[in-house]
Every structure is written in C-alpha cells, then in structure tokens.
Amino acid sequence: MSKKKAQKIFLAVFRIFARAFILDLPILAVLLLLAVFHRITYSGAWGIFISVFSVTLVITALAFHETEKFIVYLRSLAQDDNTETPRFHKGIFGSFRLIDAFLSVKNLWSQQTLSDARILDNLPDPLLMTNNQNQIVFANQSACHFFGDVLHKSVTQIFNDEIFVRSFDKIIQTQSTREWFEFQYEDSQMYAFQVRIERLPAPAKNGATIVIVLHDITQLKLFKQQQADFFANASHELKTPLTIISGFIETLQGPAKDDVVAQEKFLNLMAEQTKRMTQLVQDLLELSKLQMGQKNQQTDVILLNEILKGVIEDLSLKAKQYQKEIKLKLIHDIPRIKGNQNQLVQVFQNLIDNAIKYGAPQSTITVSAKLCNGFPQKSDKYLTDMRQVVMVGVHNTGNPIAPHNINRLFERFYRVDTVRTKSIEGTGLGLGIAQQIVMEHDGLIDIHSSPTRGTTFSVYLPIDL
C-alpha cells in the first residue's frame, strides 16, 4: 500500500470518528451531568456512551460511504454524461433525501436535454457545432440537407470561403467571441447566408466550443435583385417610346412642320408608341392588383372548350401571318368549372399568343384539354390538394427553353435573352399575370421544354372551385 493511499484511508477513518463523536457529544455531556448528581455511576455513563457511540459510528460510516460514492458519481457525471448511475441504499443508512432529490433533478435535466437537442435538430436554419480542432461535432437536419454528411469533417473544408475562414479563425484564436457576416455558398445552385459564429461560454458535452448558425437569405437577395431589375426594366420600357415620341414631336415642330406626308407618318408611329405605353401601364396595374390579393369575382360557370375555341378563333389570323396553324384537341368531355371567365380568357390568349410568336416557322400549335386525377407529382399541391383537375396544354415546336430560364419566366419583364426574342414585341409581363390569375383560381402552371419534344405550357385548374 502506498503512503498516499494510507494517508487517505487514515483521514477517512479520522473523519468518521470525529463526526460520530461530535454527534454524540451532547449525549456524553448529559451522561456526565447525571453522574455528577449521582444518578448513575461514571462507569455506567461511559458504558452507555460507548454503546451509543458504536451505533452512531456505524451509521456515520455507512452514510459517509454513501456520500463519498455520491461525490465520486457527481465528478464523473460532470465529465461524461453516459456515466452509469451507482446503486444507492435507501432509508436512514443510505442516500437520504439529498441523493433522491438529485436523481430526480438529473432525470428532468436529461429529458430537457433531449428536448433541447430535438428543438435544435428541427430548426429551419442550418446549425453546426465545432470543437477547438475545427471538427464538426453536431449538425441539425437543415444543415445535413444543405451540406450533406458533414460530421467529423473540418468546417473550413466545407466552407472554403475567405470571409468565413477569417471570421472563424478569429473565434478559434479568441480574438472575438461573436462574428456576423454574409457569404455565398455554391452547390447545385447559389445560396446566400447570413452567418453568426459564436464561442460557447463552456464546452458542451459533445466537446463543442463554437456554434455556427446560417440563416438562408437567398430568396431575400433574389427578391431585391428582382425589384432592382423591375425598376430598371420598367424605366427602360417607358423611356424608349417616350424618347421616340419626343423625337417625332421635335421633328413635327421643326423640319416637318408643313410636311403633311411626314406628319401623317409620324403621327401613326406616335400612336403605336402611345398604345405600347398604355398596354405596359395596364399590364403593370393588372399585375400589381393580382399580387396585392385584390381578387375579382370567380362565380362564372365556365365551359373551357368554348373559351379555347373562342381564343383560337380570335388568334387564327395572327397565326396565319406567322405561318402557323392552331389545332384544338379535346381528349375528354370537359366539365364546367367556376371562375372568372375574362381572366381565364386572358391566360389562354397569352399562352397561345406566345406559342405563335416564339414557335418554329410553318409549325402546328396544339391546344389540348383533358381530365386528371390530381396535380402533377412534382408540384407542392400533389399531396395537399386531392381534387380532380382539368389540364389545358399549349404545345409548340421551336427553340427549347433552357432549364435555368424556366424558373424565371414568370418574373416581371424577364425575357429569354436570344436574338429572336429581342426582335419580338412584348412587355415581359404576360406570363407573370397569367401565373397570378391561375394561382387565384387555386391552380398552377407547369412548363416542359426539350429539343426533341418542343415546349408545353400546362395549366391545371381544379374542378370543384
């Protein structure tokens, strides 16, 4: 036995005897007082004291053993949450109320820890925790969705960005306790995040010392960019006809002041530009009204096949001018639906007119309508809206729409940037208006485009509106 261990045992024994003696000291005083007044003999007093002291010594030794075991358990628990709980004796010789109370609190803490972990795991924003070796020791579900399996990987390996690495190094080197910044992360697409990195006040049980929260601001950035593009495009669309009209006015006031032929020509051109501006303003007002939720009455009983026939008849002359033919293909008997007839006419006019303008020369545009058991599987409405729907498709052949352009077609003023589209007149608001109208009718617009099959705009409208 080592000297240090012997000293430890001696101190433990001494403490037990000292505590037992202190506990029995009042009894000894009473016994000696009784002996002074000759109530009992001194030998009897010492005999009773030794008996009582022996019992107290045993109880103190058992309680001391339980207390020491409890202290050892607390120390190991502070270092490892998975420490096995030892068996404590109950009753007067055992753990008493202190240990029982602690075990109840520990059980409550464990439940709260599990709840907190579940809350972190279900946060909508990605959350990561790292240790001082830059290794990721925790990632919630959102983080795994964005960045994949990142556990035990280096955080700088996942985010190889200069701003991110510099801010993270400041935390690691304790030059800062909290860092805020924005950075972009590119995977299958570009994401924008507002990042907060903060050092924890004490190491967590999993060894985490730093927490990283990434707030996805991609949609906010996109909205701001769309807003800036909208004002730029609106200004451009209005500025061009105004510049043309202003030039014609100056010409009519000057060199062509008395030229009747020039006046008639310029006035016709000015009328065309004024009509273009009027249409642009009307489209802007219509789109703004739809986006602000100012719904029109949707109580018209609508026969879609009659609407489609009327729109095709109205656009047949324009189709001939573009050397195209429009065919209507009704696959089922289409039931009546409720909605706003004028708005739906506007939707199909826009889609068929686009097919005429952007389809291949000397081609056929096919307008079809059929019943479907529900919305397309890839849409968000597939599982949430189980109603039967009518699908109206407008198909044309021609140059396919690139995948990165499809998602932006409904943005205000957005037009596919090709030489051919630049030569075709349009405000760039038609598809945005069409989408808003279809959404007001609880439906959706889907787009398919490929080099071999052409382009199809599909409008899905529920029957029991």
Image: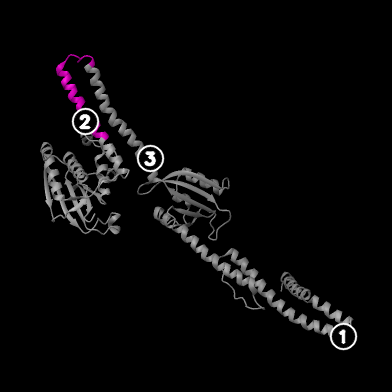
Give x and y (percent) for residue 331.
13, 55
Q: Secondary structure at mark 1?
A: loop
Label 2 vs label 3, nearer the camera: 2
Residue 360 vs 148, above or below: the answer is above
Query: Could you tell me which residue is drawn at 49 percent across and 63 percent down?
Result: 114
Q: Which mark is residue 275?
A: 2
For the magenta stretch, what is the residue range?
A: 253-281
Could you say which quadrant of the image residue 41 lies in?
bottom right
Q: Secondary structure at mark 2?
A: helix
Give x and y (percent) for residue 345.
19, 44
Is 260 magenta? The answer is yes
Characterize the magenta stretch by its predominant secondary structure.
Answer: helix
Q: Amino acid at mark 1?
A: Thr
Q: Amino acid at mark 3?
A: Lys
For marks 1 and 2, the one nearer the N-term is 1
What residue would you read off at disc 1?
A: 41
Q: Amino acid at mark 2?
A: Lys
Q: How many marks?
A: 3
Could you say which quadrant of the image residue 271 lies in?
top left
Give x and y (percent) for residue 305.
14, 50
Q: Residues within 10 Å of mark 2 (few under 14, many from 20)?
A: few
Query: Could you tell me which residue is drawn at 23 percent across and 28 percent down?
Result: 274
Is 364 magenta? The answer is no
Give the camera-side residue of 375 and 360: 375
Q: Note whether residue 113 is visible.
A: yes
Left or right: 132, with 339 as reference point? right
Q: Note whether residue 411 is visible.
A: no
What residue would you read off at disc 3?
A: 224
Residue 1 vs 136, above or below: the answer is below
